[in-house]
Amino acid sequence: MDNKPIITNRDRRLSASVFKKEKDGQTYYSVCVQRSWKKEGSEDYEREQINLFPDDLLRFANLFTKTYADILSHVQSQPKQDYPAQTMDEVPF
């Protein structure tokens, strides 16, 4: 059985890989969402993942879009602060 993804999409340190699985004559798909970051003071990378059903993808996209808008609204309602910029290290995949 081949465990390679049939689709992989990346955006900086995030990736989504689609896997096709067959069981009892049925075809199923799952999506592995992963984020990676460099450990502080090390050359090693940490990885974290969650496995989803395809139907979950749009729900997560909508949830994350709303959450981002809520955070932005909250921050804009607060007194002005100098927040540190976030850096995006190049992540080897």
Image (tube, rainbow, N blue to C red):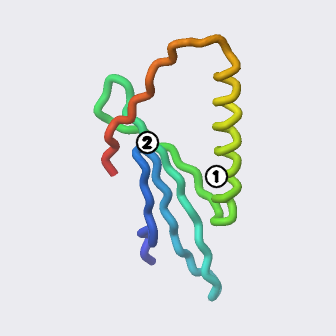
**Residue 2 spot, x, y in % from top left:** 42, 75
Query: Please, what secondary structure does the residue beneath circle 1 have?
Result: helix
| Amino acid on which disc 1 is placed | Ala
Residue named by callout 1 = 61
**Residue 17 spot, x, y in % from top left:** 48, 61
* Above or below, 79 relative to 22: above
Residue lying farthest left? 43
- Residue at 46%, 19% (x, y): give it: 84
* Above or below, 33 relative to 46: below
Within 10 angstroms of label 2, few (less than 14), some, or many (20 or more) residues?
some
Residue lying farthest bottom? 25
- Residue at 65%, 22% (x, y): give it: 76
In the rendered structure, the answer to whether residue 40 lies left or right of residue 55 reads: left
The answer to which of 64 and 5 lies nearer the viewer is: 64
Alpha carbons under labels 1 and 2: distance apart: 19 Å
Residue 86 lies in what quarter of the image?
A: top left
**Residue 65 spot, x, y in % from top left:** 65, 45
Query: Please, what secondary structure does the residue beneath circle 2 have?
Result: strand
- Residue at 63%, 65% (x, y): give it: 54
In the image, which is nearer the foreground, mark 1 or mark 2?
Answer: 1
| Amino acid on which disc 2 is placed | Ser
**Residue 33 spot, x, y in % from top left:** 53, 53
Residue 73 lies in what quarter of the image?
A: top right
Residue 67 lies in what quarter of the image?
A: top right
* Above or below, 53 relative to 50: below
Quadrant location of the N terminus? bottom left
Residue named by callout 2 = 36
Specify the label residue 9 is tagged with: none
* N-terminal label among 1 and 2: 2
